[in-house]
Image (cartoon, rainbow, N blue to C red):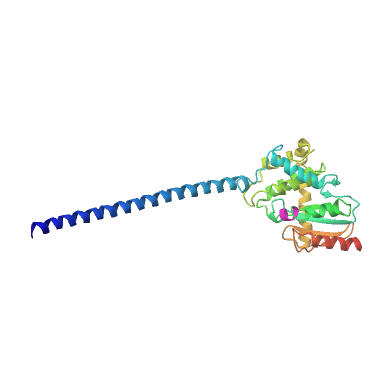
């Protein structure tokens, strides 16, 4: 091999080496860009996850089941809604509405039942101003265990509502309960939960309410309601009986718990009878 050829070969090797280094540098630069993008993506994902968790804690199961303390903005908003709905309507025991109302609706429910909440925050919001406030309908709240998993918890929560009824405050208590209902099966109903709810009911004497919860007649009322429901073949909540006040009630078959149409039709039919 001549000196010229040898020099050419060395030059070619140097150029090849430079080309290889350049290729390696470009590859490393590309990897660095990818790493940067992945890091940025990871940061974005982390921020999104934190935001989702924060929302869940504030509005989901992490925040549900713990009523806001009386006097807080959320509690005041709930109290204002309930007071606006029920204010000025006669209440006595389990009954909402005038005792002289010509039509009576019996509402069988479990305070932990999410479907009952659907009715309470749905169709009932229309029925109360249209029929109850005008003196044409009265509603009786009845107890039927369906969603609550522990019998003792069911008894305690329903008795707490009935005890509020001793002061004419059952309906504000249950309306507040449904609005602040926790996640079904999460065990959110504790003594503190019930105490917190009671403190959100305007005008409720907590000492009297606490004493009334020990009255055996309230637990007996729950048993009686269950017997009536069983005789009617009710297995789920909410379930309804409707009829002329003082007469024999009949099952009310509804098509929607948010649209009051089925309830309006049944009430109108009885008023015309």
Residue 63 left/right relative to 211: left
State which quadrant residue 15 falls in: bottom left
Can I make out residue 176 in this image?
yes
Magenta stretch: helix, strand or loop mostly: helix
Quadrant housing the C terminus: bottom right
User: For residue 236, which quarter of the picture?
Assistant: bottom right
Q: Nearer the viewer, residue 153 or 269?
A: 269
Q: Position of residue 35 (x, y in %)?
A: 39, 50
Image height of 248 relative to 39, above or below:
below
Residue ID at (83%, 56%): 105
Q: Residue 64 in the image: state x and y as whole percent.
A: 64, 46
Compared to residue 48, the image places residue 269 above or below, namely: below
Residue 213 in percent (x, y) is at: 75, 42
- Whether 119 is among the magenta residues is yes
Above-or-below relation of 264 to 62: below
Q: Would residue 40 appear left or right of 166 to someone viewing this image?
A: left
Q: Is residue 217 visible?
A: no
**Residue 94 screen position, x and y as percent:** 81, 49
- Range of magenta residues: 116-120
> Which corner quadrant holds the N terminus?
bottom left
Q: Residue at x 42, y 50 (%)?
A: 37
In the displayed orientation, state which residue is furthest to the top. 207
Q: Nearer the viewer, residue 223 or 1?
A: 1
Q: Residue furthest left?
A: 2
In the image, taking residue 55 as reference, residue 177 lies left or right, namely right
| Residue pictured at 63% horizontal, 47% vertical | 59
Q: How many marks?
A: 0
11 drawn magenta: no
């Amino acid at each position: 091999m001549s000196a010229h050829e040898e020099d050419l070969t060395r030059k070619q090797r140097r150029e090849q080496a430079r080309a290889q280094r350049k290729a390696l540098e470009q590859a490393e630069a590309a990897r660095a860009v990818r790493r940067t993008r992945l890091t940025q993506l990871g940061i974005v994902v982390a921020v999104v996850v934190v935001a989702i968790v924060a929302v869940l804690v504030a509005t989901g199961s992490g925040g549900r089941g713990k009523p806001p303390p009386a006097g807080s903005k959320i509690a005041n908003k709930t109290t204002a809604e309930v007071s606006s709905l029920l204010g000025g309507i006669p209440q006595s025991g389990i009954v909402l509405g005038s005792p002289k109302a010509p039509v009576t609706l019996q509402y069988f429910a479990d305070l932990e039942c999410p479907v009952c909440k659907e009715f309470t925050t749905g169709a009932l919001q229309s029925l109360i101003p249209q029929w109850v406030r005008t003196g044409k309908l009265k509603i009786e709240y009845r107890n039927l265990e369906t969603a609550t998993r522990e019998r003792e918890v069911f008894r305690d929560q329903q008795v707490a509502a009935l005890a509020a009824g001793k002061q004419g405050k059952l309906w504000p208590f249950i309306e507040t309960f449904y609005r602040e209902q926790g996640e079904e099966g999460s065990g959110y109903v504790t003594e503190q939960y019930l105490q917190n709810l009671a403190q959100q009911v305007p005008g409720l004497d907590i000492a009297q309410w606490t004493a009334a919860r020990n009255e055996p007649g309230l637990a007996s009322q729950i048993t009686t309601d269950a017997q009536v429901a069983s005789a009617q073949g009710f297995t789920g909540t909410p379930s309804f009986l409707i009829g002329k006040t003082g007469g024999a009630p009949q099952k009310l078959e509804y098509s929607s718990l948010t649209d009051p149409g089925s309830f309006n039709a049944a009430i109108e039919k009885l008023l015309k009878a």
